[in-house]
Amino acid sequence: MNEPLPPGWARTALGSVCRVEYGKGLSRRHRVENGSVGVYGSAGLVGHHDRALVDEPVVIVGRKGNAGAVWHSEQPSWPIDTTYFLRVPSGICAKYLGMQLGHLDLVEHDSSTTIPSLRRPDLEAASIAIAPSAEQERIVAAIEEHFSRLDDVETALNAAQTRLYALQRSAATRLFDRPDWTWTVLGEIAALKGGITKDSKREANPDFVEYPYLRVANVQRGFLDLSEVTTIRADRDKAEKLVLQPGDILFTEGGDRDKLGRGWVWEGQIENCIHQNHVFRARLTNGDFDSRFISMHANTWGQQWFETHGKQTTNLASINLTTLKSFPVPAPPPDEQRAVVNELQSVMRSQDRLQADLDRAERCSQTLRRAVLSSAFSGELTPQDPNDEPASVLLERIAASRTAKPSR
């Protein structure tokens, strides 16, 4: 239910104020690298052109893909066919309108829909709060002032995050880059195995047995996320060979390049758990090695090795078992391995606390942004001036103008 508005404000449907038009396709080969006109898609600025589709300030709304995302341009622009654009009438500040629409939830997300989309009638029916014209300008200025301070805070948080990453790298280098150690490769000290491939047709076999299994999402860098473990039906004989044992080291096969080879040690948390084909298992065959030592090495010092040796396709990077077998592993005495594990765990606990503080501060900043916008569009952010022309008069003037002037 809409909250009451201050005196002089009015609530109306977006379509009664703005003309909602479809963006026009513009292929990549027609875009100009040094063009003066911004080309906008549902993800924002996607290129430039030398001619404009819209000359006036415009609000651009994602139609499909990043549906409901809102962008604003004061300059001539070309919204493409994954967007709508709003022709904003005189008396309505385009930036005010864009900020408000960005604060609204314009799309009902449906997990059954492959590509999220926003219907034009739904966009036109969106309820917006119209402040007097002069107050719209004051609201935009107040929002920008608050957001500028939050931008400074987030810049500082990003810098702190960068320093934390550098600290992690420094600690790993100090602990693992030791010239006095001998080295081996993973394939010499462990038996490696890929996981099971999901096949819905084969899973229908009534003789198959249901097993819990780990996906890539479960295998994170330095920990296992077992909050949501799915199951798979599999041939019993094949699955029994994949059942994880405490001490098994898990590595991810693919994804973004910086996620290659991430993983952690299985501790037997779930009985009869297996793993999918995009997760590799290394089971130590040499009792002189500590699983945690090898996994910590892979997640820190060894991360750059995986990034260098991963095979890149169009969208994903990956490693295979042959590559993983050649992963270099330091081979210090067991007591030195345990000392490194203990020290790095202490460092990681401290870093986890720092990371939690940074994450908390980031969430707080985002909460404050939402609070600023909520206050702004309920009339609580700036004082009202009784001498301002009421929004109802503005809306009557817009309605009369639209009646007198045919649609484009």
Image (cartoon, grey):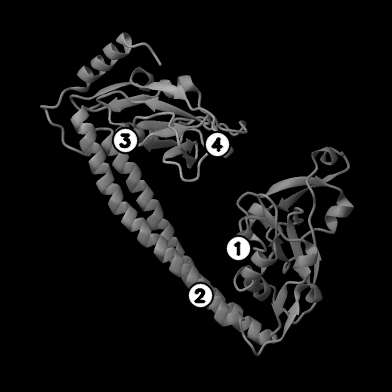
Q: Earlier in the sequence, mark 3 or mark 1?
A: 3
Q: Residue at x 30, y 23 (%)?
A: 89
Evaluate whether residue 237 shows in this view.
Answer: yes
Looking at the rendered image, the quarter that the N terminus falls into is top left
Q: Secondary structure at mark 2?
A: helix
Q: Which residue is mark 4?
A: 30
Looking at the rendered image, the quarter that the C terminus falls into is top left
Where is residue 370 shown, x and y percent of the image?
Answer: 35, 42
Q: Earlier in the sequence, mark 3 or mark 2?
A: 3
Where is residue 45 shown, x and y percent of the image?
Answer: 46, 41
Q: Residue at x 49, y 71 (%)?
A: 166
Q: Earlier in the sequence, mark 3 or mark 4?
A: 4
Where is residue 373 shown, x and y percent of the image?
Answer: 31, 39
Image position of 115 (left or right of 294): left
Q: Residue 61 or 224: which is nearer the viewer? A: 61
Nearer mark to the viewer, of 3 and 1: 3
Disc sitting over residue 221 in the figure: 1
Q: Secondary structure at mark 3?
A: helix
**Dot 3 and dot 2 residues touching (CB under 8 Å):** no
Give, as a three-letter code, the residue at label 3: Lys
Q: Which residue is mark 3?
A: 95
Q: CA distance from mark 1 to mark 2?
A: 15 Å
Q: CA distance from mark 3 to mark 4?
A: 29 Å
